[in-house]
Amino acid sequence: MNPRRLVAACLLALGPAVALAAPVRADHVEADLIAENQGLVAGATNWVALRLEPEAGWHVYWLNPGDSGIPTSLKWSLPEGITAGAIQWPYPHAHNLGDLTNYGYGEETLHLVPLTLDKEWKAGKTATLKTEAKWLVCKDVCIPGKAELSLELPVVAQAQPEVAWTSAFAKARAELPQPAPGWTAHFAVADGSVTLGIQGAPLQADKVEFFPEPNDLVNHAAPQRIEADPASGLRLSQGLSSYFVEAPKELLGVLVLHEGGKARAFQVKATPGAVTAVAGSNKPAPAAAHAETPAQEAPMPMLQVLAFALLGGLILNLMPCVFPVLSLKAISVMQARGQTDSEARAQALSYTAGVIVSFLGVAALLLALRAGGQALGWGFQLQSPVFLGLLAYLLLGLGLSLSGAAHFGTSWMGVGQVLTQKSGNAGAFFTGVLAVVVASPCSVPFMGTAVGYAMTQGPAVTLIVFAALGVGLALPFLLLGFFPRLAAWLPRPGAWMDTFKQAMAFPLYLTVAWLLWVLARQATV
């Protein structure tokens, strides 16, 4: 049991009522709405906090999530006369995955929020505070989460500290960036770098980190090059983001100075000026400037990335989300044993073309969206309720057809199902397209590293890596088409195939149920 919860339980047993709501346990995160004091004071600033505690190895995000992610948000529903301010963000930590760098929190963190009550609120009344908290929690995969949180607090003339959370609020305040004490800050964008210069900042520190608030300014995975001397002060250079368009009118961010095992964070507001860049390379080295994860010795070789992509695509064939669609293809292969070798090769190539074209389409769309400033990755389609709904209907139609419960024939609603079950090259091509569509919820070993690397490179490399993923996914049927002897390992056609086909409907139904669950979390039940 959480020690603070144990303290609170003792207080409830021994003293007056203390307003503590039970925490909400979501996927890999515990969420809670807590108050610094046992009551609210009218006409004063009162502090509450969203407490998020990710499981070990998982993290939630800062206001600038870095290369990917979504910052935590709060949507308040408060009584009249009570106003909530913006989240006060503690300084973040860098979390590295392959060639991606994100900013967030991997341990219990309090997101402090100031509340003000009008003076019309009299002592003795009770205020009910409600908020909808939304977050994204990530490890090697990401899961969106949300919780409806509420807290009832009395209005009092003089606040008394909530003992259960005193140390947590003190720790959170110590991690808030403080105003820079008389510093002068300027920044310049030149030669592919953003350079920040600060006069007045301490020149001696064990480690220096700068976290910019703009998301599309720097390459978050690039090393931060730092120099300090009395003449020019503290200077920090970092490579420009590939999505950089123009320099901001002022650069806001957080400077964190680590010394003697302690960290101090300062708010920085820099204006454009003449600042000399720190010499060095802008080549990404994700862990070079951060200590959250082990540093990589060198960038991953391209051949290794392509091998990971090929293996990742191959393993996708074993995932529950893809397997039911591949079973349709397997049935068609067994039914078509009488076809010529050239026909078998043509269908194998058509299926492979459908897979690769679909992967390239996903990559092209990702590149276009990221060029517009969106931080997206593999499976981004699942963020669209429209896509989720259409995919659920399509898979439900396929399941009903496999069960023999419905046939869509020439109906426009069955176009997708008809295309995938069409004989010949067209059916093979669209089965490949559908395999990629239903693969979007899945992430497998090797795939995350390959996709993460691809999305930090130029368009040509990104497209090549996604094409390699497609080759891996299509490889089993490509081999069957070009080496007919391999088909001898498959069971012979017979009455069992109808039973197998009907059985394959149930994984599709389960996938539909999962899609509806995700859709309900994005919209409403």
Image (cartoon, helix red, strand yellow):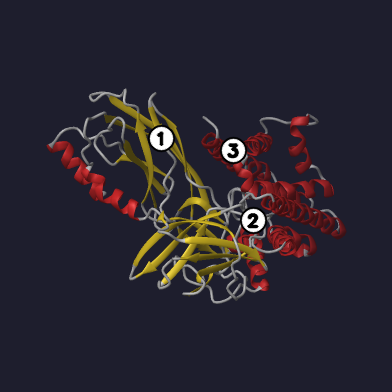
Asked where in the image residue 182 lies, by quadrant, the reply is bottom left
Above or below 474: residue 260? below
**Amino acid type for the residue under numbered disc 1:** Ala
Q: Mark 3 sits on what residue?
A: 512
Above or below 493: residue 506? above
> Label 2: how many residues lie within 10 Å, few (<14), some (14-19) or many (20+)?
some
Rounded to the nearest whole Å, what is the CA distance between mark 2 and mark 3? Answer: 45 Å
> Label 1: how many residues lie within 10 Å, few (<14), some (14-19) or many (20+)?
many
- Residue extending furthest toward the left: 14
Is 375 or 116 nearer to us in this picture? 116
**Residue ID at (26%, 28%):** 155
Asked where in the image residue 267 lies, by quadrant, the reply is bottom left
For marks 1 and 2, the one nearer the N-term is 1
**Residue ID at (25%, 47%):** 166
Q: Mark 1 sits on what residue?
A: 84
Q: How many marks?
A: 3
Q: Mark 2 sits on what residue?
A: 247
User: For this view, does 135 lie left or right of residue 455?
Assistant: left
For marks 2 and 3, the one nearer the N-term is 2
Residue 426: image location, x then y, percent: 83, 46
For label 2, the SS is: loop
Rounded to the nearest whole Å, what is the CA distance between mark 3 and mark 1? Answer: 39 Å
* Residue 187 seen in this snapshot: yes
Q: Nearer the viewer, mark 1 or mark 2?
A: 2
